[in-house]
Image: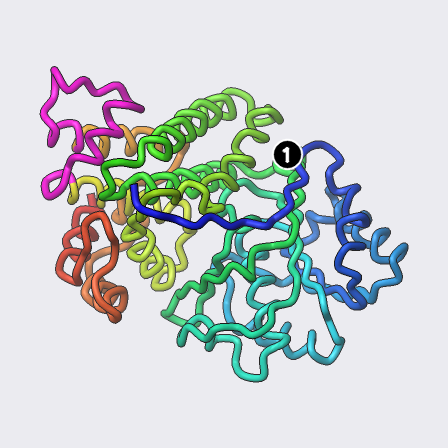
Amino acid sequence: MIGFEYYNPARIVFGEDSEKKLKELLEEYKPTNLLLVYSGDFIKTLGIYSAIEEAVKQLGIGFYENGSVIPNPSIDLVRNLVDQGKKDHVDFVLAVGGGSSIDTAKAVALGIPYDGDVWDFFEKGKVPEEVLPIGVIATTASSGSETSNAAILSQGEWKLGFEDDRIIPKFAIMNPKFTVNLPPYQTFVGIADVLSHLLERYFSDERYSDTTDYLIEGAIKALTVNADRLLKDPKDVNARGEIQWLASVAHNNFLDAGRRADWGSHRIEHELSAQYDLTHGEGMAVVTVAWTKYIAKIKPWRLALLASRVFGADAFDYSEEERAFLLSEKLSDFYKKIGLKTTLTELGIDDKDFETMAKRATRNGTVGHYEPLDADAIVKVLTLALG
């Protein structure tokens, strides 16, 4: 078990009517001008918009908004919001929605106090001197960005991340009822996203971190059980609550304790979604199945352990390598059960851009920590992903 430092100051307000605490939460930060970032009119249908309007009115806060966020958010919108936010003297950014809205808000909170181009944080690793406070009202269960220290943005063919504890939101309001009317596809790609965060943390070369191992295994079991419940009853608010909480648990860095996570699959998927504008959760389903197939032959022990403990693969009946391959099959079966594609061929993607994406992914060296992958290895994983 390696040494670690855990820090996450996000205040979580979870449950029915949790949005009614917004006024109390905002009061602590005494904002004068608030920028609301979201995507679409659903926030009005759910009553979130009116709750925000009422809170800012009672507190006398200037109120500005933008509902133009799209999946795989672009730096172009962020730049526009930064410019407008500076003119409006915005000093608090509130995101409503899922990862795209939250990551946009985080980038805006970085950019408004900064004199340069906000892309510097993502491309050059610029360290911020100041970050505006961020709040979140989560309406999906997927990215976990509501309590994470990370943001992902796209610029053309580049999809890059930025990490800093100062972009962890000050508070995250989570009302599971807000997720009940999500379309099935959005629900289940969200679940695939949550699972990907759990798996990336599980695939660690650290052999002595039992506590975190068992926590992740339990979280995966809880996720799959509640996915089954939603397949039977999409309106099951208790199942949705479990999954929304798991989304935060999977990505608030608590499950990094005592280990170094892999993240190679995410780097590969970021290239795919930048190149083809894939939905991240479905892209992760495809890459995860292929990555586990590739790693099963090279370094099977972690995969075999998960196959045994979560999917019941008995070491008496299967070799370590066989259990590792079985894990890939079990994951593929799960993704198919929840209606996701598991191959690039199904997504209409061929091999013509594999080398370009692999070189882009490895421009700063190998990716992944459990088993580092160079450009040639990434091409092999992508080839397996064809199916």
According to the picture, the residue beneath numbered tag 1 turns out to be 176
Most extreme residue toward the front is 3
SS state under label 1: helix
Q: Residue at x 56, y 56 (%)?
A: 168
- Report crowding for label 1: few under 14, some 14 to 19, many 20 or more residues within 10 A (C-alpha): many
Q: Name the magenta segment's main secondary structure.
A: helix
Residue 307, image x, y percentages: 24, 27
Residue visible at 33% across and 32% down? 213
For the question of whether residue 32 can be seen, the reply is: yes
> In the displayed structure, would residue 153 be above or below residue 288?
below
Residue 361 point in image, percent of width and height? 27, 64
Q: Quadrant of the N terminus?
A: top left
Kindly tell me whether residue 336 is visible in this rendering. Answer: no
Give the residue drawn at x 36%, y 70%: 157
Segment tinted magenta in the rendering:
296-324
Q: Quadrant of the C terminus?
A: top left
For residue 310: magenta? yes
Report whether 25 appears left or right of 366.
Answer: right
Q: Is residue 151 left or right of residue 179?
A: left
Amino acid type of the residue that numbered disc 1 sits on in the rendered structure: Pro
56 vs 249, nearest the viewer: 249
Most foreground residue, 386 or 37: 37
| Percent x, y of residue 345 | 25, 48
Q: Is residue 158 above or below residue 183?
A: below
Residue 258 position, x and y percent, is 34, 43
